[in-house]
Each structure stands twice: as C-alpha cells, then as structure tokens.
Amino acid sequence: MKLQKDNIEAVLAEMTVREKATIIVGAGWGSLFEGFHLPFCHGHRVPGAAGETRPIERLGIPSIVLADGPAGVRIKQSGATAFPAAVSLASSRDPKLLEEVGKALGEEARAFGVDVLLAPGMNLMRNPLCGRNFEYYSEDAELSSEMAAAMIRGIQSAGVAATPKHYALNNQETNRFHNNVIIDEKPMRSVYLENFRRAIAEAKPWAIMASYNSVNGTPVQQNKHLLTDILRDEFGFDGVVLTDWTKHKNPADKIAAGVDLLMPGSNSNIRSICRAVRSGKLSETRLNEAARRVLQLIVKTPTFNSSSKAGQLTQTQKEAHAALSRRAAAAGCVLLKNENNALPIAPDAKKIGLMGVHSYNTICGGIGSGFVNCEHRISLYDAFKARGFRLNGRSEETYTAVLEKKSNLVKPAGLGCVTKYMAEPVYKEFRFFSEDCVHNVVDLADAVIVTISRQAGEGVDCKLEKGSYYLADAEMELLRSMSRRCLHDEKQLIVVLNVAHPIETDSWSSFADAILLVWLPGQEAGHAIVDVLTGAVKPAGKLPVTWPLKYEDLPSAANFPACSKDNKPVKTPDGIKDFDYTRYAEGDQIGHYYFDRHPEIPVAFPFGFGLTY
Ligand code: BGC
C-alpha cells in the first residue's frame, strides 16, 4: 500500500510501531550520523534548510523539508528574496500586504523544494531588548495575531505549511534553552496565549513550533497543559506540533505531552519512543495520533503533491518579489518626527550629505534563523546614486573605503557567527570626520542625512549599554556635530533609524529635524527608504510597539532578561539552575497595555504613533 490523500487510516494501520516512531522524528542536523552529533549540520535534500523528516519507502511516505523563516527562505544557496522583518511589516498595519508577502514566501519555499516554512515568528515584544523582536510583530496581542493570521493565510495559499512560532512565552534570548517563565494563568492567557489563539482560529496553520523555554516549571515541549489542554482541546489546533531545534533527552515525554514531531531528531529518539510504547510509558494511541498528524501534513505538501525538486526562482518571480519587498518596506516606515518640513526632501534637491557608515551598508535583516541569503542588498547610498543624486565626495570616499577594506567590521552577535549565511556585515560607527569635513558635507548638501543602525538576532539579547540600546559615543558625536553645522547653515538634519528594536531617543532626538524609522527593511532597503524620503511614497507606518522615554519605566524592566533571587541578571554557562527564571511580575501589563493606564508616565513615542507628510 502507498500513502494517498484518502488512505491515511489504512496506511497507519499497516505501520509498525517503529515506522510510526520514525516519521515523528526528524532527520536534520547530523541525525543521519548517529552518535556523531553535528550541531549545525543542516538538511541534506535542500542544503541549508533547517531539517527534514524521514521517508518510509515501503509505504510511499516521502520525507518533507522544513526551512526558516519569517523574512524569506533561509537556505545555503543564495537567491531567495529578503523581505522586510516582521516588525516592519506589522508597522504597515496592512493584513492584505502581509498576505501578499506570505504568498510570495510560500511560492519561494515551493520553488526551493521546501514544504514547511518555519514562520511567522509571533512572540509578543515584552521588552525592547529581546534580541529577536524584529522577527515578531508587536507588543499587542490583537495586532500580532492579525498580522500572523494574514501571513499564515498567504504562505498556505501557496500550498506550503506555515509554522507560527515560538509557542509560548519565548520573549527573550538570554538563557533561551532553559529559562523558566513564571507567570500567573490569567495574564498568560489574556495576552500571550490569546495572541496564538486568535491566529490559529483565523488562519488554521498546518503546524506550530513549541518553544525551548519552560513555563511555570515545565519545559514547553513537555508541557501537557500548554500543548494538549490549551492548544489542542481549547484552541482546537489540528495541525502538527513540532519542537524548536534541540537535542531531545526525553523524547517520549514530549510526545506524551502533545508534541507530534521532534526536530531535528536522532535514531536514539526513535529507539526510546519504541521502548516507551513497549513499556506502556507512552500509549500507542498517542503515538498513532502524532503519526496521523504528520501524515496529514505530508499529504498536503508540495513534495507529496507534485514531487517538487529544489530549483530556482524564475526571473519573473524574482522581479515581482523584489518589487513587493520594496513596497512592503516603504509601507513599514514610520515617521517619528518631522519639524521645519525637513521631509520630504525638496524636489529640486540634487546633492545629498550622507553620513553614518550604515547609510552605505543599510542593514536589511537580522541574525540567525531570521536571516535570508539574498542575492543583493540595496543600501541608501546605492539607491541615491541609482537615482542620479550626487553624494559628498569626502564622506563618500571615506565610507566606501571602509566597506571595501572591511575595517571596522563587527563580529556578528549570537548565532551570526555560526555559518556564512546567518548574518550580513555590520560596522562600528567611527570618528573619521573632522569638523572641517562635517562643514564641507553640510555646506554643499541640499539634504543632510545620518543613519543610525542596530542589528540583532537569535541567541543574544540587546544590552542596556552604549552601542546597543543607547547611542555609542561616536554616533552621538556625529549627530551633535552634524546638527550644530545644520543649525549654522539653516539646514535640516534627517535621521534614518535602521534598527531591529526600539532604542533610546530622548538624549539625541532634539538634534534631528526629522526621524524616519525604517526598521530592517529587506533587500530593497535603500530604494524603499528613498521612496519615502523623496515623498514618492508618503509615510503611513504606525508603531507596533511603544518606544519608552526611559527604559526603567517599562514594567518588564525589573525582570528582564532573567532574574535571580537577588534580581540580578543570571549567567548560566553550565546549564539549568533553579534560579534560571524570569518572573513576569507585570502580568499582562506590557507595552501600551500599561502605558494606556498610566498617561502620567511620558513615553518617547506611543504605540500606534506615526506621522505623515
Ligand atoms: C530557532 C527557530 C528556528 C530553528 C530552525 C531555532 O534555533 O529558535 O526559530 O526555526 O532554529 O532553524
């Protein structure tokens, strides 16, 4: 008998316990080399994919391929389109746009031989320092779930599975494998789980990813309350629950709790599941349920339906998706400040004074599984040049020389150093400019622009330090001297914020006449930003997350990233300790839920804020 869409029960009845265990254990990163665990060896059918499942040839069950991620298909081969990061898409507040991007992502996944896209990321932004905030939509459960639902619908309309992640309460990167979230049931449900409930109800994802962290003492991947009682029985989720990527010490417990697919999985996982069924520790009914769900997923995938092979995008797809990426990036720009009609740039402007190293190397996406190995990235500098603007010779020479020589390159944080296809280059801002140079740049320019950038990503949270949440001294100096000269020349200073997360603005915003927040705008970054700066596209983005005036005003500030008994950040180089927890003492009072109730506490920019021309 061979698997078909309508004979799942019959195939299941023919399967041995071992075969059933085999299809619920993935075959990614080195699990093919049992006993030789290669932590970052990726799938074999599509190199660089996050993983795949195991085939059973006798029953015509193929292996399917799973790949990241939220801003584009992350595989080793370059060529996927890098779309704007989720936080940028959410700033557009346009579900139709997200659905379009989702459809394009699904089509690309198909074209590259991927069946399950590990996206969207949809954890709530509990705190601006979370390293993966850019991969998520909002601090607001309603907005987040609306955006996620649109994205899921889009991806699945192309016949590819969406996998909203990371269920649940995965709101920080510090100690990400072991952190135990302590939270009362009521706030947990009212915002954090509500976010997933709505998206599931609206868009019916075919899969969902169970996060690494624990909740109230039990790892999510072993948490029957979260995975079965709530997700299955209450929310009615009927797809596959797969784990976030880890080595599984107690696979049978995870399956018993409600996991259907262990990723990436190992041969010993299969053996322990079989042993657990034989000993009665894991019921065969539960094993059948998990195997049935995996089969139900398999028959929906491109691999099963069209025996698709890893290929390439067509030229037409590439162009259409690049145009969509650009449109989405422009729609996600949020105008935070615009005094003295600094923006849009005057129609007769010809010369641009462009400062800040990331004006020449715009950061398009984040680090880690949210990264996309695209073919090109358009910087602000590239885009101005392409439109015939003239750049100031002195600054142009200096910055382009730095990029060419790769001096001032910063080592990527977190997972960025794992492979070449997990991070794009980022530079440290520097003090090359003499007062004389600043005068020259400003005096000759019709528009003066400084870019401030922040990359972030998987595996590490941002820090409450200069160069991270606060401006670095070199950035502050650059803004100060540029603003001084702009005042002198009666010119306006425009700041482009190319950041993965909110940063502190109070100490420097008065230097700028205009501030345009562009987040991480994807591969067409420069084109999209120039579209908005010139007024070809009017800014319409609205903040999906509050920008606090003072970090300490955030209710989560006292308990982020992790909190030990004496309320100090926990360092855990050597595994789980009983104080590895983050107490969500603020309950559901995150972001605007809190500030709306406390109008007496000023914020830098409130949730929903965004100006236009
Ligand atoms: C990340 C997931 C990702 C997975 C596969 C994990 O480390 O947390 O978001 O989908 O790796 O790459």
Image (cartoon, helix red, strand yellow):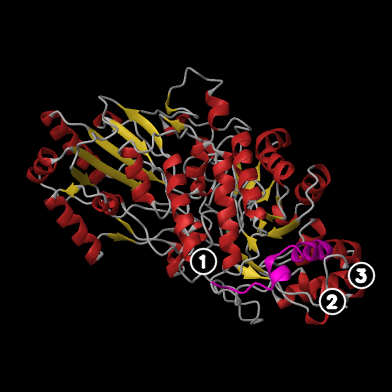
Mark 3 to mark 1 CA distance (whole Å): 37 Å
- Please name which of the two marks, 3 or 1, marks the residue nearer to the observer: 1
Q: For the view shown, which residue lies furthest in the left direction?
A: 436
Does residue 82 appear anywhere in the picture? no
Residue depicted at x 57% and y 76%: 38
Tell me the magenta residue range: 290-311
Q: Earlier in the sequence, mark 2 or mark 3?
A: 2
Identify the residue position indicated by label 3 in the image.
10
Q: Quadrant of the N terminus?
A: bottom right
Residue placed most toward the observer, 455 or 610: 610
Q: Which mark is residue 2?
A: 2
Helix, strand or loop: magenta stretch: helix
Identify whether 199 is placed above or below 403.
above
The front one of 530 and 133 is: 530
Please identify the quadrant where the C terminus is shown.
top left
Q: Is residue 379 magenta?
A: no
* Sooner in the amino-acid sequence: mark 3 or mark 1: 3
- Marker disc for residue 115: none
Q: Calculate the distance from the C-alpha at mark 2 to the C-alpha at mark 1.
A: 31 Å
Image height of 321 relative to 292, above or below: above
Q: Amino acid at mark 3?
A: Ala
Q: Amino acid at mark 2?
A: Lys
- Is residue 474 rendered to the left or right of residue 214? left
Q: Does the closest atom of ligand 1 sit within 8 Å of the Cβ of label 3?
A: no
Q: Identify the residue position indicated by label 1 in the image.
A: 313
Does label 2 or label 1 sit earlier along the sequence? 2
Q: Secondary structure at mark 2?
A: loop
Alpha-carbon distance for marks 2 and 3?
Answer: 10 Å
